[in-house]
């Protein structure tokens, strides 16, 4: 597993975590390049469908990053995420997928260093887990129809 | 006008869909006026060889119920597709995989071991499992191959329409048959049902703000007959399920289990139910949330009860 470079999708909320990632960049803090950021308006927008879709087409890990509890721009979007992820993890386990492939973390706009730390520690834990073998799943005609 | 030619088939199913086609009552006379049934293994004595001899596209419509689990299911699905102008996935098994599809949490080996060895009522000391070929004094016997993964009909052949339900309600069946008889066909790929909205839209129960402190199983409480079942902590699947059934189960004090499949435009019914359900949990404390969630005994099996083969992940990964 020496040369395994994971592909990791990070859903970052627009108001805190994306700004945190931005701060990591402008502060020139280095973090592992496995992370592919997708900006969403709120971590509450991250439907379990997004996570399952990422895993089904071969993402090795999925990070969901939101504002710290109490700081949500939409008041309670991140609380919805807080409730969703544990149930999603239970389902992943039943599907034979390691629950460690999905992680929820809170990163504020001022926490550039924390963003880098989360990115690095998650990448390391995915490296330890090894690749996700579900990437061979092809899109069914029905999915293709819905884009 | 020449009579329509209709074929009916069952693959991996329980037989309930074949009964559901008869549940249309006296409308069956209208069907008999308009159509001849040219193949129906449950009801009439036709052989596969009879179908093989029919010219391609000579059947007007095939109502195919059941999922694709064996090589026989797959072979007949392809055969009937070639012979039929319209292929209709009739019922949840052929549309989404349904209950037979739940074995996608396992594989052939574990399914066989459970069914033929481990079940308490099984007496099989020699641990004999079904084989595709067996030699007996009279010669070699063959059985169809049992696949590791259950597929939907649309994952096997091109499908024109879907009729949801486990089994489809009488009025849903008639909606599809009427479209065939009158020739007023919806666009290809339509899921034929009276509603594209959720079951809640048809459910007469009183709905207020949804906040759940504890989940219950149906035998654990006697639900209030007026109030929304989900608000009472029962895992009522109505919020993530296509209507058209008339919300029959909630009206009989039983939570909806999701047999009409996802609402229009949704591709993974289980993920949508998970999303909606978990966001109404009434707690912001991670430990309490975990405790509330742990009350759901089999979340994946519950959320994907009818749609596992049609879901994004399709099956569990077996190590």
Image (spheres, coloured by chain):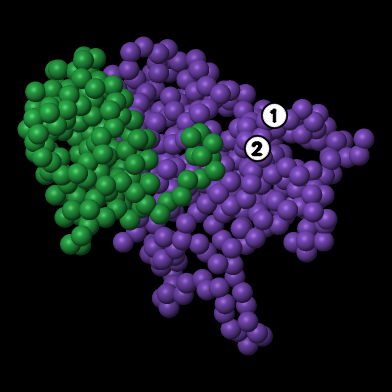
Chain colours: A green, B purple
Secondary-structure class at tag 2:
strand
Q: Are marks 1 and 2 on the same chain?
A: yes
Q: Is residue B217 visible?
A: no
The residue sitting at 19% across, 50% down in the picture is A126
Say which quadrant the N terminus of chain A sits in: bottom left
Chain at numbered mark 2: B
> Dot 1: what SS?
loop
**Does B189 sit left or right of B1 as displayed?**
left
Q: Is residue B191 visible?
A: yes
Q: Name the disc covering residue B174, or none.
A: none
* Mark 2 crowd level (few <14, some 14–19, many ≥20, 10 Å Cα): many
Judge left or right: residue A128 versus residue B40: left
Q: Chain of mark 1?
A: B
Which badge, 1 or 2, comes first in the chain's sequence?
2
Residue carrying label 1: B186
Residue B66 is situated, as x and y percent measured from the top left of the image, at 59, 49
The residue located at (71%, 57%) in the rendering is: B79
């Amino acid at each position: 597993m020496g040369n395994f470079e994971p592909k990791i999708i990070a859903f970052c909320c627009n108001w805190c975590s994306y700004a945190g990632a931005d701060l990591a960049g402008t502060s020139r803090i280095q973090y592992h390049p496995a992370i592919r950021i997708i900006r969403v308006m709120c971590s509450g927008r991250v439907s379990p469908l997004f996570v399952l879709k990422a895993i089904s087409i071969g993402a090795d890990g999925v990070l969901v990053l939101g504002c710290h509890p109490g700081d949500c721009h939409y008041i309670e979007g991140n609380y919805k995420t807080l409730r969703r992820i544990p149930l999603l993890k239970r389902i992943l386990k039943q599907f034979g997928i390691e629950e460690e492939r999905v992680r929820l973390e809170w990163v504020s706009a001022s926490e550039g260093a924390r963003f880098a730390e989360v990115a690095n520690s998650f990448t390391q834990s995915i490296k330890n887990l090894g690749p996700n073998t579900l990437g061979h799943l092809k899109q069914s005609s029905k999915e293709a129809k819905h884009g | 006008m020449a009579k329509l030619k209709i074929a009916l088939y069952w693959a991996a199913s329980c037989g309930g869909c074949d009964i559901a086609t008869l549940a249309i009552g006296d409308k069956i006379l209208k069907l008999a006026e308009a159509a001849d049934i040219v193949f129906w293994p449950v009801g009439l004595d036709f052989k596969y060889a009879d179908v093989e001899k029919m010219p391609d596209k000579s059947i007007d419509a095939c109502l195919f119920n059941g999922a694709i689990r064996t090589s026989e299911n797959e072979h007949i699905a392809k055969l009937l597709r070639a012979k039929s102008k319209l292929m209709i996935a009739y019922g949840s098994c052929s549309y989404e995989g349904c209950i037979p599809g739940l074995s996608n949490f396992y594989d052939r080996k574990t399914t066989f071991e459970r069914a033929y060895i481990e079940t308490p009522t099984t007496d099989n000391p020699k641990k004999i499992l079904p084989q595709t070929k067996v030699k007996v004094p009279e010669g070699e016997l063959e059985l169809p191959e049992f696949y590791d993964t259950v597929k939907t009909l649309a994952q096997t052949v091109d499908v024109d329409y879907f009729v949801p339900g486990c089994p489809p309600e009488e009025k849903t069946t008639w909606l599809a048959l009427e479209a065939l008889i009158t020739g007023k066909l919806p666009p290809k790929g339509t899921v034929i049902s009276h509603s594209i909205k959720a079951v809640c839209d048809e459910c007469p129960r009183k709905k207020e703000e949804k906040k759940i402190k504890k989940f219950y199983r149906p035998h654990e409480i006697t639900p209030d007959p007026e109030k929304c079942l989900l608000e009472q902590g029962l895992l009522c699947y109505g919020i993530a399920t296509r209507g058209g059934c008339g919300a029959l189960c909630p009206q009989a004090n039983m939570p909806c289990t999701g047999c009409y499949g996802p609402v229009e435009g949704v591709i993974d019914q289980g993920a949508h139910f998970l999303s909606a359900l978990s966001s109404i949990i009434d707690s912001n404390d991670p430990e309490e949330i975990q405790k509330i969630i742990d009350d759901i005994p089999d979340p994946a099996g519950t959320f994907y009860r009818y749609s596992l083969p049609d879901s994004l992940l399709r099956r569990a990964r077996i190590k």
